[in-house]
Amino acid sequence: GIQVEQSPPDLILQEGANSTLRCNFSDSVNNLQWFHQNPWGQLINLFYIPSGTKQNGRLSATTVATERYSLLYISSSQTTDSGVYFCAVETETSGSRLTFGEGTQLTVNP
Amino acid sequence: NAGVTQTPKFRILKIGQSMTLQCAQDMNHNYMYWYRQDPGMGLKLIYYSVGAGITDKGEVPNGYNVSRSTTEDFPLRLELAAPSQTSVYFCASSYRGQGASEQYFGPGTRLTVT
């Protein structure tokens, strides 16, 4: 099956700093989603981005499908950005299944 | 819209007990999914359904059963609970036409089997 690798596994920032999270995948995808799992365990949809670039406030994402990677940018980070960020992908042959990476644990200190 | 709702939020089971995790969505989505998340890991698909009356296995189906009698509801049944089923369970839904689409997740059920 498809492999999804996220980097870095852990990231510690001071409030106000910018960061880039990366997601590499091993096959062509027809769905790619970024999620934020907050400290209470809730999964929050950030982006549905199988290709191209999207922005939502301080967050933006870019997927380069031909090169099999996606990037999530967080600017002017806030303590409420803390949590785990997951990338999840679906392929033509995966039977509607989202395959998740192992996540990036982000800690933003005040 | 309430989106995807799950009950209960928390549950403790003894080994060998059974229970049903409830999931409902009010977005008229045709696809519904059950995932589990073990500590420090990403989610893995247990079962999914493409519509009422149709279900299929995901990556980790052993020890679970599902049914889909209506578009809105997709319960997950655990028979003979085992400690390995201690996990957080997430239900999700999506509307699929010709291709893939965004999946929306419920708040999760935290299950402990002791």
Image (cartoon, rainbow, N blue to C red):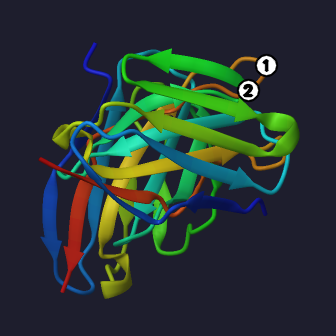
Image quarter of the N terminus of chain B: top left
Query: Looking at the rendered structure, which numbered label has been put on residue A29?
Result: none
Residue B37 in the image, given as x and y percentages of width and height: 40, 63
Image quarter of the C terminus of chain B: bottom left
The reply to whether callout 2 and callout 1 are in contact (CB within 8 Å) is no
Q: Is residue B35 above or below residue B113?
A: above
The residue lying toward the viewer, choosing from B104 and A14, is A14
Badge 2 is on which residue? A51
Determine the image quadrant of residue A59: top left
Q: How many marks on residues? A: 2
The residue lying toward the viewer, choosing from A61 and A91, is A61
Element type at mark 1: loop
- Label 2, label 1: how many angstroms apart (C-alpha)? 17 Å
Q: Residue at x 32, y 38 (%)?
A: B106
Q: Residue at x 70, y 33 (%)?
A: A63
Q: Residue at x 63, y 27 (%)?
A: A49
Residue B6 in the image, given as x and y percentages of width and height: 26, 41
Element type at mark 2: loop
Residue A28 in the image, given as x and y percentages of width and height: 85, 43
Q: Is residue A102 above or below residue A59?
A: below
The residue lying toward the viewer, choosing from A99 and B19, is A99
Badge 1 is on which residue? B98
The residue lying toward the viewer, choosing from A75 and A52, is A75
Q: Is residue A50 above or below residue A108?
A: above
Q: Is residue B48 left or right of residue B63?
A: right
Given the image, on which type of amino acid does mark 2 rest?
A: Ser
Q: Is residue B77 left or right of residue B21?
A: right
Q: Is residue A96 visible?
A: no
Determine the image quadrant of residue B84: bottom left
